[in-house]
Image (cartoon, grey):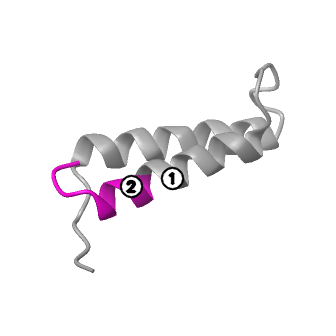
Amino acid sequence: MKLNAPTQIIFLVALVLAVVALLAVFSILPVLPVQPFWIMTAAFVVLALATLVPGL
């Protein structure tokens, strides 16, 4: 299986999601309808898909 580097936009989207999750964990951003675990999981899934799918 060949892995690809994610584009800069996809990487920044995953990074923003991860930072939002961390801010929610430390109660800096307490009002979110989703638990921080799921936001961090979404960030990981976005980044993993970007490495597996060519062109993302």
* Residue for badge 1: 45
Q: Name the residue rendered at 76%, 22% in the picture.
A: 32
Residue 53 quadrant: bottom left
Left or right? Give the position of 14 relative to 3: right
Q: Is residue 46 magenta?
A: no
Left or right? Give the position of 48 relative to 30: left
Q: Name the residue rendered at 40%, 38% in the picture.
A: 13
Seen in the picture, residue 47 relative to 20 is either above or below; the reply is below
Seen in the picture, residue 3 relative to 32 is either above or below; the reply is below
Q: Name the residue rendered at 18%, 57% in the picture.
A: 54
- Image spot of residue 38 (x, y percent): 71, 43
- Image spot of residue 17 (x, y percent): 54, 39
Residue 49: mark: 2
For the N terminus, which image quadrant?
Answer: bottom left
Answer whether labels 1 and 2 touch (C-beta < 8 Å): yes
Type of secondary structure dominating the magenta stretch: helix
Q: Is residue 51 magenta?
A: yes
Q: Nearer the viewer, residue 30 or 4?
A: 4
Magenta segment, which residues?
47-56
Q: Name the residue rendered at 45%, 45% in the picture.
A: 14
Q: Nearer the viewer, residue 53 or 22?
A: 53
| Amino acid type shown at disc 1 | Val
